[in-house]
Structure formats: C-alpha cells, structure tokens
Amino acid sequence: MSVLIYLIPVALFLGLLGLGAFVWSLKSGQYDDLEGAARRILIDEEKDQKNNEKQDDN
Amino acid sequence: MEQQAISSSSDVVDRLEDQSNNTGYEGLVQRAENGDLSLSILVSGVHCAACIQKIESKLSQEQDVSAVRLNFSTKRLSVLWTGQKERANNFVKLVEGLGYGVRPYTPDQAKESVKNQERLLLMCLGVAGFAMGNIMLLSVGLWTTSTETMGVATRDFMHWISAAIAIPAIIFSGRPFFKSALNVLKSGQTNMDVPISLALLLATGMSLYETINHGEHVYFDSAVMLMFFLLIGRYLDMRARGVAQASAFELLSSLNDFATVVENNATRRVPIRDVREGMYVRVSSGEIFPVDGMISEGKTTVDTALVTGETLPRDAEIGDAVYAGTVNLSAPVTLIVDRAAEDSLLADIVRLMEKATQGQAHYVRLADKAARLYTPMVHSMALIAFIGWWGVGGMSVQGALMISITVLIITCPCALGLAVPVVQVLASDKLFKSGVLVKSGDALERLAKIDTVLLDKTGTLTLGVPALTGTYDAHEMKVAASIASHSLHPLSKALCNVYDGDLLEVKDVKEVAGRGLSCVIDEKAVKLGSRSWCGDVNAKPSEQPELWLSVEGGAPVRFIFQDELRTDAIHAVKAFIQKRLKLIMLSGDQNSVVQKVSMACGIGEYYGEQTPPQKFEFMENIKSNGGCVLMIGDGLNDAPTLAGADVSMAPGTAIVMAQNAADIVFMGDKLFPVYETYETAVRTQRLVRQNFMLAGLYNIVAVPLALSGMVTPLIAAIAMSGSSLLVIGNSFRLRLKS
C-alpha cells in the first residue's frame, strides 16, 4: 500500500497540470471564437511567408 | 441587401475620392497603459476563412501594427498599434477597400456579461471535471477493496484526499447553482437549483462528517459527479440562449454609424444619434439615408425596398421627403433633417421591435414549466423520507438523512435538464449543415406549435432582385450593358448581371434622376431609361418593370424585367398547406402585383400596400385571437412583425436588422428549407417529449426504491447518470433517422 504515497500525489499532479492548461487556455481567450478557430485551420501560415519576403527584400 | 449597398457605397467613395468619409473613428480609439492604441470595429460581409486572412494580413502589413485579430463569431476586429490616433481611419479605409462594410463597435455591458457568464460556466465545468476524475480514481480503489484488506487507516486517508479535492471543487463549481438558489429563496420562491444545491451541500456535509468519524458512508464522488453532469446541461443551455440574446443587442447598432453634416460650407462626420433637427446632411449616391428629412438640394432616385417593400425605386427631388434606411441610388443630395435620429421612422421601427421583443419574454419554455412542477415534489419527497424514517420509523438522524440525500440525488433533474438542450443543440447543428441558422434556443419549440404562416413578398417568396426576361439581340445587349454598368439602379444591375462579355467604351455618361442614363458610344447619342424619356410612348404598356434603350437614328428597344419567384416557392407553399397551416401574404407592394404573385404560388389570402405598423397589427390580431404565428420576411418593414411573432424566419439576403429580429435565418435561393425547418422542429419536439417521458419513467422506478432506503447515494448517482445518458442517447436519434 505504501506505493500510494507516491502514486496519489503523482496522479493529482498530472490532473492539476491538465486543469492548469485548461484554465490558461480559457483565460487567454481560446474558447471565445470557436467558429473562427475551426475555419482558421484552412489558412496557410502567413508569418513565415512574410518573413521570407522581408529577407528577400534585404 | 444592405451588404450590397454598403460595399457599393464604398466603391462610390473611392471613385469620388471623397475625403469627408471614413473619418470619425479616431474618437473610438482607446489607449492602453503602455501607450499602445487599440481600435474595435464591427466588420460585415465576413463569411469564410479567406475573409479572415485577407483582412488580418492586409492590416498586419501596416507599419507599427502589433496585433490584428478578427473574431469570426462576433465579427469584431481589434487592431493594436503604436503611434497616431488618426491612423484608425486608414485602417477602416483599408478594410472597406477590401470590399467589407465597417461599423463602429460600441461595447455593450449586457453582452459582455453574457460572455463572462459563459466563461465562468466553462471554468466551473473544467474544475468539476478535474475533481470528478481524481475522486473516481480513488473511489475505484475503495469500491474494489474491502476494508479488511485495506485497513481503516488507508480508507480514511483516501477519504481525506477525496474531501480535499471535493470540497474546494464544490465551493468553486457549485456557485452557479448556489447563487441562483439563493436569489430565488430571497424572493420567497423556489426553482430547480434549490434541490440541486441542497443535495450538493447535504451530501458533502454528511460525507465530511463521516470522514471525521472514521465512517464508511462517504459520497464525495456522487456529489461531484452530479455537479459535473448538471454543469454540462447548464452550459449547453446557456450557449443556445446566449446567441439569441447577443443578436437582440445589435438592433440599435445601425444608429451607431456616421452621417456627413454640412455646416458653413464644410462637412464633418457626426454620429447619427447626435444629428439634430434642422441640420443639413449630405448623402452621396449609394449611401443609406441616415435620418428622415426633406431634400433641399439635388435630385435623385431612392430605393425604398428595405423600408416599404416596393420593388422599384422612387424619384425624389427638392421638397420630397425621404426616410432613414432607404438607399440613395443615383446622385448626391443634401437634405434638411426634419426629425432627429431618435424620432426617425427607423427609430420608430426599432422601438416597435423592442416592444415586440419584450412581449416575447412571456413565453415559458417547456423545461421551465416542468421544473416548476417538479421542484416542490422533490422537496416534499425528501422531507417525507427524512421524517418517515426518523420520526415514524425510529431510525437514527444520520441514517434518515442519508436516505433523504439519496432521494435528492436520485430525483436530481439531470435527465430533465438535458432533455431539451441536447435535442435542441443537435437539431440546430443539423439545420446549420443544411444552411439554416437557428439563433434562439427555444425557436424550434415555438415553431412546432404554429398554425398560421405570414409571408412577405419581395425577397421572401420572390428573390427580391429583378431579373431580365426574354431574349435580346447580342449587340443591343452589349450597348445596354456598357451604359448600365455606370448606374446603381436595380434594373441596370440586373442588366449587367446577365451580360458577361466585353463592354464598349462609353463617353460623357450623365445620370438624369428619375429618367435614366445618357452617353455617347461611337459618336452616337445613346439613352437608357424610362419609357417617357427614351422609349416608344405608344408601345403596349407592360405590367412588369421595363427599361428602354435608344440609339441615335434607331428605333427604341425594350428590356423587360421580373422579380422572379423562388424556384421552389410553389412546392414549399403546397407542403405547408398539406400540414393544414394557414398561409397569408402581407406585402408593402401594390395590390395588383401582390395578387399576381399570390395566384402564382397558390396562396389564397393576401393583403397589399401594408405599412410596417399595419403588418404588426395584423400579426397582433391573430395572436390575440389565440393563433400562433410564423412570420417570414426580409425587409425593415417586416422587422417589427418578425420580432413580435411567436417565431420568425428571414432569408440570408435580408437586411441585418431583419436577420437580427428573426429567430431563424435560412440561406440560399430556395424556400423549401423553411418547410424542412418546420418539420425538424416538429420532430425535435416529439423527441423532447419522449425525453421527458423517459426521465419521468426513471423517477417512477427509482424514487420508491430510494424512499425505501434500498439505494445508497453512490448507486443513486450512477442511476441518475444512467438516466441522463439514456436521454442523450434518445436525442441522438434525431441524427440517425432522416
């Protein structure tokens, strides 16, 4: 039974980690625009392109 | 329709290089603490990923812009930048240049609070889910191992850990229930949240007591599981309702726009709500009249379709009255304001709508009705169980309380709470995929009950835009389209729509208000316009709208147009009649036109030349005689009736205000989705009733068992969840059967 001393805290820690991630994603507004998020996956990554263009300009 | 008007107005602005437009936005810029500037605006016409990308990438290429984000759900665009305030106007211009309409965004307290509530519920749900998972982990150990193997110390240890997770989780995530219960108790009433709160608090309190006294009846798992399931139902319900509320708040946003006021020979942009009687307002062609007034300078054609429902534009010259919400088609004019924006016809309509919307709040949803009946029953049953076992049966307080808690948990209205929202969310989802957007949660519930359908003509039964009919000589088409491309008149637009070849070079284009266009092609004078101006006055009169083309030295040619019925209008009307629903057509258009259309699609009862208040009264009359009305319409003139009817639908081409007022919006050129929505609503209601029956049946079986003390709180929680799953499963049948 002594294994519980380690396992229960480990389980709780992992759970809390998940909860923390959820709270963070909620606070940073990731659930505010679910419809938009679903459509954004269709957009190509713009930033890389833009950076490349800038480098080309230089 | 309004989107069209807005985008074409920005075209005109670009063409005229009018500096007076697109200004005034610097007043809306907010400064953050670190000196960054931010602007929030509403963008209309955004409908896909490409739109998001176009707008965001265009603005993020600007210098000093640090962040651009377009929220697709709320259509709100936020821009963050450093530097000058005035750049706000540039950003607006850039977005308009891409072909989107822009309106100022004014933060709405009520809307924000809805948003925050939704977030809070989601947070509670997350915490409850975490707690449930972890407590269950411990509980599985407790259930599968006997106390003899584990020892009392280990068992207490596990109980204490459960308590450490469950108590904070219940205090945090139970708040939505506790708050609402407290509020109703204060006002001396009761609702579903009272037994829920009671069950949560009692179960937790009892479990804590047992844990402290090394007992074995610890049921933190039941309490948290109960809370988790209830929160899911609550969140789904909130989402379904949230959409409806959000759209009601947007009604007045059309008054947030700007008007160009002329003062001492200079123009300045003023928010429409600040425009006062006696001011002079300039309206360029393509723009929407912001206020009611009288034309003091210029001569033009006015598209009144949005306000009165007339298909054809009307001429207006000095001294004529024009109304807010109508569109200035051909030439810039100046008008003297005779009523401030708050008193304009538009504002009257908005007020009528507010009244109508408030009237609607009286509707009691089926789930709330059930809750009202259910709650007192649960309370009394739990109380009877306690008194019965303790007072009469001679059981210990603790044991009697345990049975009482079991009754509370087992009767917990989880299945009842899920019965309606799950089916509604599934139905909305299904309809959304076929192009029908259900905006308010209980719209389908109301739709299933209707007995009368009121229809608008222009834009609802018909497509709302005139289309060219007949065949014409290719060269004549080319000449006509070349000249028509210079006008915003609906007939000219219709001509250009059907023609897709090259255009001829056109010189000296002049638009003569109320008559037509004149120009020079190949050194010949060409005119396109009304019969009296350039047509053959002796030709047989036509009932349909017509345009005449005359080329110098040739005989005039006639183009005939028709506002066509939606292709399946007759089919849809028939389907409704088969269901024994009464169909009535109400239109602002002339009687003769209305009669013809109603004959064509088989509607027996029709009324023409109806003003917006008349339509509203007509609908109120039916309602007060016990009827249940579905209103379908697309114009400003339909908006109050849409808002006041028991349930309402608008096509996707309707003006923003009508779409906001309607409970359901359908896309595409077909009318049949309206009937399909009705059918889905009827089926949805059938499933909801089945769900209620399942929940009731479960209670009939489970409650006596709980009352007799044969069930522990844990089994009660599992049974309760089982009944919830059963209800969810039944709801999914909506998807299986088609």
Image (tube, coloured by chain):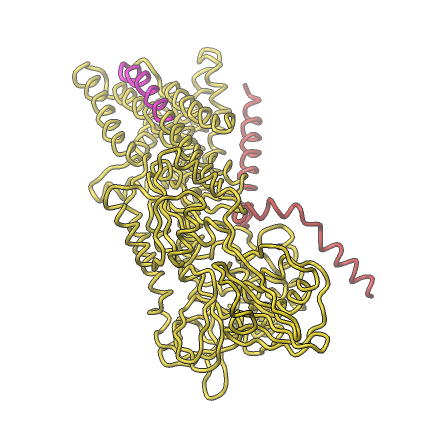
| Magenta segment main secondary structure | helix
Horizontal side, residue B152 vs residue B622: left or right: right
Q: Which chain is red?
A: A
Horizontal side, residue B723 vs residue B498: left or right: left
Residue located at (65% from left, 75% from top): B552
Q: Is residue B191 above or below residue B714?
A: below
What's the magenta region? B691-708
Of B199 and B92, which appears nearest the observer?
B92
Residue located at (38% from left, 33% from top): B579
Q: Is residue B684 above or below residue A28?
A: above
Q: Is residue B46 above or below residue B181?
A: below
Q: Is residue B702 magenta?
A: yes
- State the image coordinates of residue B292 (x, y, percent, origin top left): 38, 72
Q: Is residue B683 magenta?
A: no
Give the drawing colour for chain B: yellow
- State the image coordinates of residue B235 (x, y, percent, origin top left): 43, 39
